[in-house]
Amino acid sequence: MVDFLFRLSAKEKMLKLNLCGVISQDQYNQLKINEILSTCRDLFFHLILDRKELEVEGYGRIFLERVENSIDAFSKRLDTLIADAGSDENKKQLLEQLK
């Protein structure tokens, strides 16, 4: 999945990847969403991996997602960029965008 996301990389875009279907218990054990999000975090302005339609054989749908809209995603990303901004000028510009 990480290779797929690297090919789609676009730092100015928000990406929501819908994972759906049925996976085996072994595949579930190998699915490390937090690691994927951490590794691919800076490839996009914001990245969401939606697992609501993903089922695990023998268990059904077990993934709970919090609901996010594009405004919340935008605000969260800007908060992260503001915290990481090196100069006061960069922070000022990002704060203006947040307003």
Image: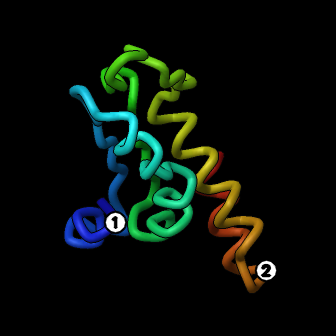
The vertical placement of 22 against 32, above or below, is above
Which residue is denoted by mark 1 in the rendering?
2
Give the side of residue 53 with respect to residue 4, left or right: right
Disc number placed over residue 39 in the picture, else none: none
**Residue 27 placement: quadrant:** top left
Three-letter amino acid code at disc 1? Val
**Residue 85 placement: quadrant:** bottom right
Give the side of residue 90 with respect to residue 37, left or right: right
The vertical placement of 80 against 17, above or below, is below
Q: Position of residue 6 (x, y in %)?
A: 29, 72
The vertical placement of 41 against 64, above or below, is below
Judging from the image, what secondary structure is the residue with disc 2 in?
A: helix
Of residues 61 and 88, the one drawn nearer to the viewer in this rendering: 61
Of residues 34 and 67, the one drawn nearer to the viewer in this rendering: 34
Q: Position of residue 75 (x, y in %)?
A: 61, 44
How many numbered discs? 2
Judging from the image, what secondary structure is the residue with disc 1 in?
A: helix
The residue at the point 32 percent across, 26 percent down is: 54
The vertical placement of 47 against 93, above or below, is above
> Label 1 crowding class (10 Å Cα cut-off): few <14, some 14-19, many 20+?
few
The residue at the point 74 percent across, 84 percent down is: 86
Q: Which corner quadrant holds the N terminus? A: bottom left
Q: Which residue sits furthest bottom?
A: 87
Of residues 7 and 93, the one drawn nearer to the viewer in this rendering: 7
Three-letter amino acid code at disc 2? Asp
The residue at the point 64 percent across, 68 percent down is: 93
Disc number placed over residue 88 in the picture, else none: 2
**Residue 94 placement: quadrant:** bottom right
Q: Position of residue 80 (x, y in %)?
A: 68, 60
The residue at the point 52 percent across, 25 percent down is: 65
